[in-house]
Image (cartoon, rainbow, N blue to C red):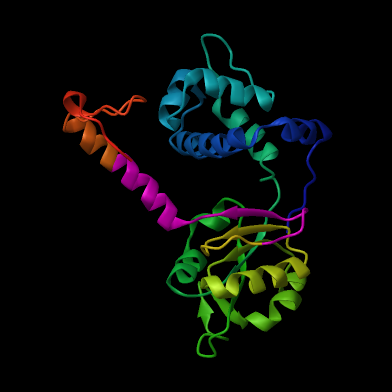
Amino acid sequence: MNTTPAEPADRERARAIPEAAVARLAVYLRVLSGMADQGVNAVSSEELSQAAGVNAAKLRKDLSYIGSYGTRGVGYDVEVLVSHIERILGLTRNHSVAVVGIGNLGHALANYGGFPGRGFPVTALFDVDADLVGIPVGGIPVSHIDDITAVCVEREVSIGVIATPPPAAQSVCDRLVSAGVQCILNFAPVVLQVPDNVEVRKVDLAVEMQILSFHVARRADEAAGVSVGNNGLGVDGMVIRP
């Protein structure tokens, strides 16, 4: 595993970046990588912000956190900006990934070709199903969940992905933590209890669908001419009760 350390200046900048800006930097990197693949050498803040779906002023502020400032009339050097963002996001080192729970979602994650190319090779898979243990998925044999600690230590796993049913998630999390895994991506719809030094990112697909449902309903209401303000008045002044 590549463990190239970050420069002190990069570490200082990283500590000062707000969480929301970190998420946007990842989006910028995806867009910029696509531009680089197409042979684009320079991009203006307006072009990049439009492609990333953010305000240009916010984009310039985000990039200032990593010490990148565009040149007037030229914009940003795509290759240099990609390099800066990769260093800040810690992508100058590979992160060995373990997926626990090889159901439909786990299979999809194990076979996803986008992880290795971005520095996130999946090196370990775990499940409790005896019919799955020993069977290769995405070229990696599935190990039993009881072997999480030993396998994760041996393969230097730095990121654990939990794709188990909800009742098993906390136990799996505990095993990953005991193996020294400090970053966990959780797809199970439960809140995990972890030590302060462990970072958990939760992906709840049902919640995301509910948020989208809200936007669909709001746009449908707007199209129908329904407008509800702080005074609780709807169409033609009719009072709308909660």
The quadrant in which the N terminus is found is bottom right
Quadrant position of residue 162: bottom right
Q: Does the segment drawn in magenta span residue 205?
A: yes
Q: Image point 53% across, 68% down: which residue?
A: 163
**On the picture, is 11 further left or further right than 143?**
right
Percent across and percent down for residue 29 are 54, 37
Q: Is residue 136 above or below residue 222?
A: below
**On the picture, is 160 further left or further right than 40?**
right
**Residue placed farthest to the bottom in the image?**
130
Residue range of the region highlighted in magenta in the rendering: 193-216
Q: Is residue 206 above or below residue 129?
A: above
Percent across and percent down for residue 70 are 59, 17
* Front position in the image: 175 or 148: 175
Percent across and percent down for residue 227 are 25, 27
* Front position in the image: 4 or 236: 236
Q: Is residue 127 above or below residue 194?
A: below
Q: Is residue 44 visible?
A: no
Q: What is the tally of numbered marks visible in this picture?
A: 0
